[in-house]
Image (spheres, grey):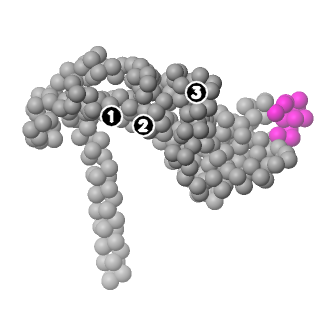
Amino acid sequence: MAVRKNEIAALIVSYVFVIAMVIFTLYPVAYTIVGSFKNNWELTLGGGFWPKEFTLNNYYEAFIKGGFLTYTWNSVIVSVSVTFFSTLTAAMSGFVFARYPFKGRKFFITLFISLMFVNLGSITMYPTYRILIFFKLTGSLWGLVISMIGGQGMNILLIMGFAKSIPKELDEAAIIDGAGMGQIFFRILLPMLRPILAVIALFAFRGAWNDYVWTMIITISNPGLRTLAVGVVQLRYDASAASRWDLMLAGSAIAVIPILIVYVFAHKQFISSLASSAVKG
């Protein structure tokens, strides 16, 4: 009987902890979205969670006067491009490392693993920026995209782990039928890698969409290239909008909602990938 009481107590504590974590995680997001429909007067004075009067004027001003339409378009271009190229390059690299031995293979794998435990952070910003200047890419969103595609060590290792679990007999059968390396990759391996590719794509999109420091450095001399993350923060320091919490919350909601939408469509693949990794581990 005592054991049963202990189990019930542990279950109650677990539920309380999970509910508290959910509230602390979701409340700021929910308040940002709901608060974006309040007027600035109500936000400044505080008040309840729900707005006394819903207004869409905040979004109109953010898009038209705040330039958020341009920032949103820039964020979409950068995030989608980074997601596509990061996923493709990681998949190709992981496929080659897993299936085709070559000289220096162990060295590169060791290098990838060692760099996983080193946080280079801001150390690589200046050299990367100098490279972009050399190739005259600082005035283009493509310079930002190219610079954010790197650092695929972890993703390549994940692809390698999944690729090694796929029988090589499939490759051999395809080769007998006359298939080349490209056909084996795109027709056989790539469809089987969809769970892990979804995870890589999700994190790549999130990283590119939310990046602030590096994006600010690249776009500091060209405000027309700002993304949403930079635009929202810069709005706070704009003298004409320093006290416009309604515009800042509207801009923040615009920046948050796409991430939530992407997760809604990708969460099944994300969960299946985690389950698959657990089984293989």
- Mark 2 closeness class: few <14, some 14–19, many ≥20 residues within 10 Å: some
Cα distance in 3D space between marks 1 and 2: 9 Å
- As drawn, is 58 to the left or to the right of 8? left
Pointer 2: what residue? 212
Q: Nearer the viewer, mark 3 or mark 2?
A: 3
Residue type, mark 2 in image: Tyr
Tell me if residue 89 comes above or below residue 12 in the rendering.
above
Range of residues picked out in magenta: 171-181
Quarter residue 189 falls in = top right
Query: Cβ–Cβ below 8 Å for labels 1 and 2?
Result: yes
In the image, residue 99 above or below residue 137 = below
Closer to the chain start, of discs 3 and 2, is 3
- Residue at label 1? 233
| Residue at left offset 43%, top offset 22% | 222
Disc 3 target residue: 133
Disc 1 crowd rating (10 Å Cα; few below 14, some 14-19, many 20+) is: some
Amino acid beneath label 1: Val
Residue 10 percent location from the top left of the image: 34, 72
The picture quadrant where one finds residue 230 is: top left
Q: Is residue 140 left or right of residue 252?
A: right
Which mark's residue is nearer the viewer, 1 or 3? 3
Q: Position of residue 258 (x, y in %)?
A: 40, 31
Q: Mark 3 packing: few (<14 Cα in 10 Å), some, or many (20+)? A: few
In the image, residue 192 sits, relative to residue 187, either above or below, namely below
